[in-house]
Amino acid sequence: MKAIFGAIFAAAMATLLVASAPQPSAAAPRPNVAFDGIWSVEIITDFGDCNRGYRYPLRVWQGRVIKADDDPNYNVAGIVARNGAIGVTIASGDKTATGTGRLQGNVGAGVWRTSTGECSGRWTAQRRE
């Protein structure tokens, strides 16, 4: 009996919560899709004892920066603002680097540095699709 009462109570609460939740309006902001696509990002080391250069395929999807491949050796997280300002973190093993910059049309550029400050440099990007 307790189980049946609990299930009925849970269902009633869920219905009440859904009914009282704010409903989306026509004025709700839409996701940022202006920069969506696959981007080829070239990372150049200008300071420090890190590899001279890297190239990563990254995907921008609804204003978020994510991996464009299934390479398990690195992770990516970032965001692109409506004006093209971008912030990204790339992690590989125990190493982390952050980059900031701007995308404009089908190109982008900015700077990056490791979390320890041992290396830094610049990056460029081109939208591929």
Image (cartoon, rainbow, N blue to C red):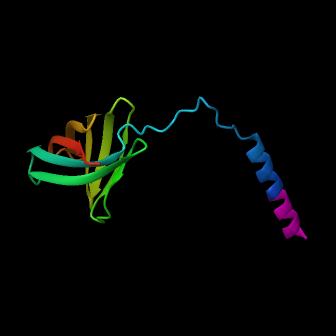
Where's the N terminus, which quadrant? Answer: bottom right
Nearer to the camera, 117 or 42: 42
How far across and how far down the image is residue 11, in percent? 80, 57
- Residue extent of the magenta highlight: 1-10
Nearer to the camera, 84 or 95: 84
How far across and how far down the image is residue 30, in percent? 51, 36
Query: From what the image shows, is residue 62 above or below residue 76?
Result: above
Q: Residue furthest front?
A: 129
Nearer to the camera, 122 or 102: 102
Q: Main secondary structure of the magenta part?
A: helix
Task: Name the residue at 39% across, 31% down.
Answer: 82
Relative placement, left or right, of 95 versus 6 is: left
Relative placement, left or right, of 68 versus 109 is: right
- Residue 8 colored magenta? yes
- Residue 75 colored magenta? no
Query: From what the image shows, is residue 23 above or below residue 37?
Result: above
Task: Name the residue at 59% across, 29% down.
Answer: 27
Query: From what the image shows, is residue 29 above or below residue 54?
Result: above
Residue 72 found in image quarter: bottom left
